[in-house]
Image: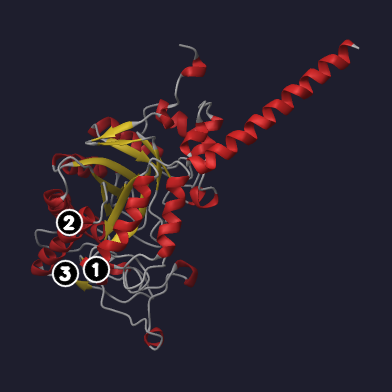
Amino acid sequence: MSAECITPLLFTPIRLGSLTARNRVVVSPMCQYASEQGGPTDWHLVHLGQFALGGAGIVFCEETAVEERGRKSHHCAGIYQDAHIAGYLRINEFLRQHGAIPAIQIGHGGRKGSGCSPWEGYRALTDEDAKHGNAPWQTVSASAISAGEKVPVPHALTREEIREVVAHWREAAARAAQAGYDIIEIHAAHGYLIHQFLSPLANRRDDAYGGDLQGRMRLCLEIVEAVRSVWPADKPVFMRISAVDGSGEWSMDDTVVLAREAKARGVAVITASSGGIAGPGTAAPVPRVPGYHVPYADRVRREVDLMTIAVGLITEPGHAEEILQAGQADFIALAREMLWNPHWPAHAARDLGVKDYLDLLPLSYSWWLQRREDIRRVTRDAHAADMVAARKA
């Protein structure tokens, strides 16, 4: 078989339990701050729908809170009420209709809740905000340690309250299944509640949920078990982790241990990110260069024998393909690049030599675009013939 006939790995279908993703392009969760009472709006249908139309294999909705106080702001997404299910189901049916696997990332902001949007500086809510219908609320965490100088001190969860939090994750996962999601990801990264328990910078407990690594991992692993217990057995559970936090208090060695324990409890895919325990949720402890998280995904994949997703400024099709060909990850996730170009998958397929790259788009797009390509080809051929004739003359 000639090299021209080989399908790039980026566009080779891949199995996940009973699912088959049409390609390895993943749209990362991207918070939109456009929800109403935690539920989705038409904004989410259009925002997420464009990625399915553009050819992505897996489309994640934004990080979605498992309980109301787990939201980062009043405008963040949630799946803590049965009333939320119908809105998500409508979106997911559209995604599936256009070839993408609908996925949800569920999480809890913990001490990073009761705040504002990033374009308002992530600042904590105040009494002044309450006058405009955005009252602050009491946040929770592993310990009563603030996330920053101007951030209120959270309430340290009691053992009974921890059991209630785990139950919220279980209930959210059950609702996600009813809402038509095929993939669920547990958000254990970026300084949010699970990460707050994992990191000794935020967890100073002296009970079974603190202290050594096993104690600090306990909440995370209990949540994995709770989610897996209600999630359809033939569908995968993913987990996003901050592989390092920049302080030296959480290392790649710890991440490998956590990934092994999560795998034993049913996690099938790890998204390896970094940072967030101090500063903004995506604050990175390493220089932000294209593929800066890839070594983390590579090590988890090799040492834990788990599928991984590579993230972090991967915008060039050739770079994405190199990562997959090197065996460093199984999927490539993009976020802001997809905002800039929702049709990135189709463009990447063209750049990597996929013959029928337009087939990634809906027929009502591809038919017209193919006609344009045919006209261009005829024009080029005619021009080339004219040039040959002119030289002969």
Residue 390 as seen in the image, left or right of residue 344: right
Q: Residues within 10 Å of mark 1 (few under 14, many from 20)?
A: few
Mark 1–mark 2 CB contact (< 8 Å): no
Asked whether residue 247 appears in the rendered view, the answer is no
| Residue 193 position within the rendered picture, expressed as x and y whole percent measured from the top left | 25, 62
Where does the image place residue 262, in percent across and percent down from the top left? 18, 44
Q: Position of residue 19 (x, y in %)?
A: 26, 37
Comparing marks 3 and 1, which lies closer to the viewer? 1
Q: Secondary structure at mark 3?
A: loop
Of callouts 2 and 3, the N-terminal one:
3
Looking at the picture, tell me which residue is in the foreground, 376 or 57: 376
Task: Indicate the amino acid at tag 2.
Answer: Ala
- Which sits earlier in the primary sequence, circle 1 or circle 2? 1
- Figure quadrant of residue 82: bottom left
Question: Which image quadrant is residue 142 in?
Answer: bottom left
Instruction: Please report whichever mark, 3 or 1, sits nearer to the chain's N-terminal start.
Output: 1
Task: Report the residue at 28% width, 35% height from top.
Answer: 307
Q: Classify 281 as above or below 151.
A: above
Give the residue at mark 1: 83
The residue located at (45%, 41%) in the rendering is: 55
Q: Quadrant of residue 66?
A: bottom left
> Residue at point 38% right, 71% down?
75
User: Rounded to the nearest whole Å, what is the CA distance between mark 3 and mark 1?
Assistant: 27 Å
- Judging by the rendered image, the residue that carries numbered circle 2 is 174
- Whether residue 378 sits left or right of residue 301 in the image: it is right
* Amino acid type of the residue that numbered disc 1 sits on in the rendered structure: Ala
Q: Position of residue 36 (x, y in %)?
A: 36, 72
Camera sees residue 352 = yes
Residue that badge 3 annotates: 157
Quadrant housing the N terminus? top left
